[in-house]
Amino acid sequence: TVWPDEGCISINGEGGFATIGDALEWADDGDTISLCSGTYEEKLRIDKSVTIKGPNSGAPAILTGPPDDSAVSIRAANATLQWLTINSSSSGIYVKDVDGVQLAGLKFGSLASTAIRSAGSTNLTIQSNTFEDITTGVVYMDEGGSVRILNNVFEGNTGNAIYVTDGVEVSLENNEFYGNMPDEDGANAAARFTDATVVTSTNNLFSGNTGKALSLNDSELVSQNDTFTLGTYALVAVGGSVLVDGATITNPTVSGIVVQTSTGSAAVRNTTVTGNPETGLSLTQTEWNSGSPTRAVGIHLTAVESIELDTVEISGFNNAGL
């Protein structure tokens, strides 16, 4: 095979391609396409099980997508995208109906829509990426499937940073969420899950987010060893079932955990919820008398099946600890 010698993009260390698209045409399943530093103005449609990676040190490889289209469309199982910075006048990456895709070590610049949009994909991995100052949503996933979101940093984003719906199975592990802010419609959750989504959240840090850290509607949650500081609420769940084990919740401005479900159970174990009377919500006597059971409380639980509390410490709330 006579490899092109037109640029610095290689396949398995061979060749010299001028564009990523040219390299994709030559590549076979299982190949690795390596990019050099620089800016690539092209639309990537990945329909082969390849790895595309930029340099992991020095100046980055920057991909700028075409007008009014996602920068990257992934339509192949087991494709990997790694160590790129992505700009787009639409969504950054669109993953549709595929299995085993990995998105790792990515950063995002200017975007007009969601950084990562996934529909109906299984075993999607979103790992060790940096999501900063994104105003259009970070991760949106629907139409079933499964995703593992781990070791990412979410900082200064707007609206619902993660929004997952339609029965997706989610594993949220060892992520850090800082300073999430409301969008113009008032959406403001570090992670929001709806419509039969099943969530396992483990060892995540939610710090300084201005709204809810975890927000759920008609979904299932198991939270293990998560840490929450500030924000209006650590966790609000309506419908579904919730188990919180080993949480540390400090200084929410409204309440710690609020679960209201007529379909499932609520359990809180080995958890500490600490409010700050000087900065947290204090109800007036009129508000007390009118009844505000979910505000200025450490934990509020209603459930049809069962409620369990085991080794829970609560302090510092004006309305009620429990």
Image (cartoon, helix red, strand yellow):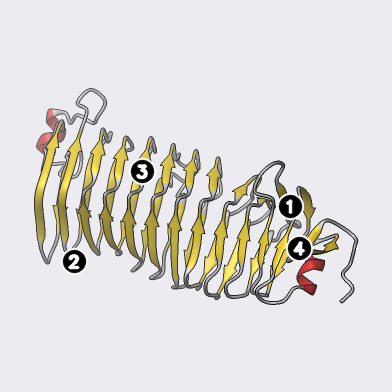
C-alpha span from label 1 to label 4: 24 Å
Q: For residue 264, which quarter of the picture?
A: bottom left
Badge 4 marks a residue whose secondary structure is loop
Q: Which mark is residue 13?
A: 4
**Residue 308 picture location, percent across and down:** 10, 57
Disc 3 packing (10 Å; few <14; some 14–19; many ≥20): many
C-alpha span from label 3 to label 4: 39 Å
Q: Marks 2 and 1: in contact by CB < 8 Å?
A: no
Disc 4 packing (10 Å; few <14; some 14–19; many ≥20): few
C-alpha span from label 4 to label 2: 54 Å
Residue on which the image places disc 1 = 64
Q: Marks 3 and 1: in contact by CB < 8 Å?
A: no
Chain-order first, disc 3 or disc 4: 4
**Residue 150 picture location, percent across and down:** 44, 55
Residue under the image location 78 percent in, 53 percent down: 40
- Which amino acid is tagged 2? Gly
In this view, the mark in front (1 or 2): 1
In this view, the mark in front (1 or 4): 4
Q: Marks 3 and 2: in contact by CB < 8 Å?
A: no
Most extreme residue toward the top is 278
- Which amino acid is tagged 3? Leu
Q: Which mark is residue 264?
A: 2
